[in-house]
Image (tube, rainbow, N blue to C red):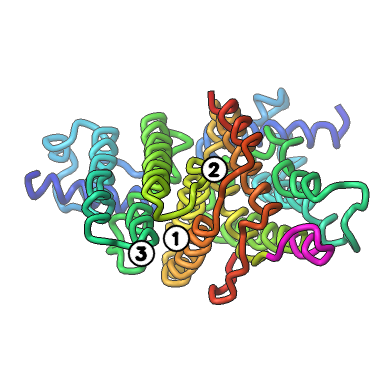
Amino acid sequence: MPYTKQKILLESIRLFSEQSYRSVTMRQIAAAVGIKGSSIYNHFESKQEILTEATKLFISTMSHYLPTPENFWDMLTNDMEPLEILRRFTYSFSPEDTGLLLQLYRILYQEQYRNKELRNFYMQYIENQTKIIASIIEALADLKKIPPASSIDIARTMVYTLESLCIEATLNMDKLPELAQRKQSLFEYIFHIIINGTTLPPSLMQTAAGQNG
Amino acid sequence: MGKGKTRDSIFYTALELFSEYGYEQVSMRQIADAVGIAGGSIYNHFDGKGELFDAIVDYFVKMVQQYYDPIFEMVELPGDLSPLEILRMFIVDYTSQDMDMFLRLYRIIFTEQFHNPRLQAVFYETVIQKPVKAMTRILNLLMRNGAIPPCDSRLLAAVWNRCGLMFAALGAHKDMGNTNYQQYRQTGEALVQLVLNGAYPAAPSLSPCG
């Protein structure tokens, strides 16, 4: 991406997250970048296009942090502990984050109720994360690294719990270290639950499966 | 219309419009129009949008308190309910009766808290601190009665509440209510079973958190 275009994108993300997507104008973005109001349109057709680009940046930033399902087998070959494997797959934020990721989260969180594109993107993202974690839990159980687990429920518990902490982190950056600490203890506690067995009685498993369909 | 009735009508209309379009996007005039009163007379009931918003926040706080206050006032657990019923009643089902209203309020509060520090504090106290305390109390009472195996009640309550919050955030999307609610029930039910079966162990080395 050309330098000016990148600069526009980053300034937009900063402004959208500090104020809101709706209230920021193209003119304001241009001023923040230090270019003329009209020349911003040489790079982006509309504010919506900037937002779409920001969503792509969120995906690519997250993909730096999150392993792919294929990495799972490398981790196993390298004898990585199940706790560590799950920790890497559930990455959401850390105190070392350089603002960008949290700014992107902040835009997602506050605009999701007003913008259909973001809403669909975010819902899909959470659902995918949950499914990936569920399949990792299943694979770990198949390999007898952890006891059999009600994978989808525990995955949802894990993903949702951590996501809720991430929302709070974007609201209050000062609390970042404290929230990261909490994230760690809640994550470890959920892992503790997995290790100590989460098999549901067969009757309930069936009800759960029924509700899924 | 009597004064109280008009005030109520303004309140519920504002709630509807804020949750639909966002606080910033709605004007006092629009609210008055939707209610069917003259633009100026809305100010006989509310000084401005800010006051309306505060009334909505107060309503939300009261609504959540309604669920949790009885838990703090309870001397002992209701004797006619099984542990399963108690966990379901106080943890899984606690918002189900007013689900639509709850999610509508949640959508307003969730969006606006990004721009309103006071609201952030209210939100933290109302949907994080208080529920965790209440759920911890329920679990402690159950443990004291020997109705469930020992568990780290505070950590468990924190996980439970965090997870529930995320369900609320997703459920606040207009057409998501139903799918989300099914998933919520399923996950909640799974967690209840885990508590009853003792799969939540004590974890003294980990620090409690909300």
Question: In front: B198, or A44?
Answer: B198
The chain identifier of the residue carrying mark 2 reads B
Marks 2 and 3 close (CB-CB < 8 Å): no
Specify the segment rendered in magenta.
B139-150
Q: Position of residue A21 (x, y in %)?
A: 37, 42
Whether tag 1 and tag 3 are in contact, CB under 8 A, the answer is no
Q: Earlier in the sequence, mark 1 or mark 3?
A: 3
Vertical relation: B9 (above or below) A105 = above
**Of helix, strand and loop, which one carries label 3?**
loop
Q: Amino acid at mark 2?
A: Ala
Question: Pointer 3: what residue?
Answer: A94
Question: Which residue does the image show at 27% across and 55% down from the upper left?
Answer: A76
Within 10 angstroms of label 1, few (less than 14), some, or many (20 or more) residues?
A: many
Q: Position of residue A109 (x, y in %)?
A: 44, 46
Above or below, A171 against A62 in this view is below
**Where does label 1 land, which residue?**
A169
Instruction: Give the x, y percent position of residue B28.
Output: 62, 36
Chain of the residue under the numbered disc 3 shown in the image: A
State how far apart marks 2 and 3 are (Cα).
Answer: 22 Å
Residues tagged by mark 1 and mark 3 found on one chain of the structure: yes
**Magenta run includes residue B145:** yes
In terms of image quadrants, where is residue B134? bottom right
Instruction: Determine whether A175 is above or below B5 in the image.
Output: below
Q: CA distance from mark 2 to mark 1?
A: 15 Å
Q: CA distance from mark 1 to mark 3?
A: 9 Å
The amino acid type found where label 3 is placed reads Ser
Discs 2 and 1 lie in a common subunit = no
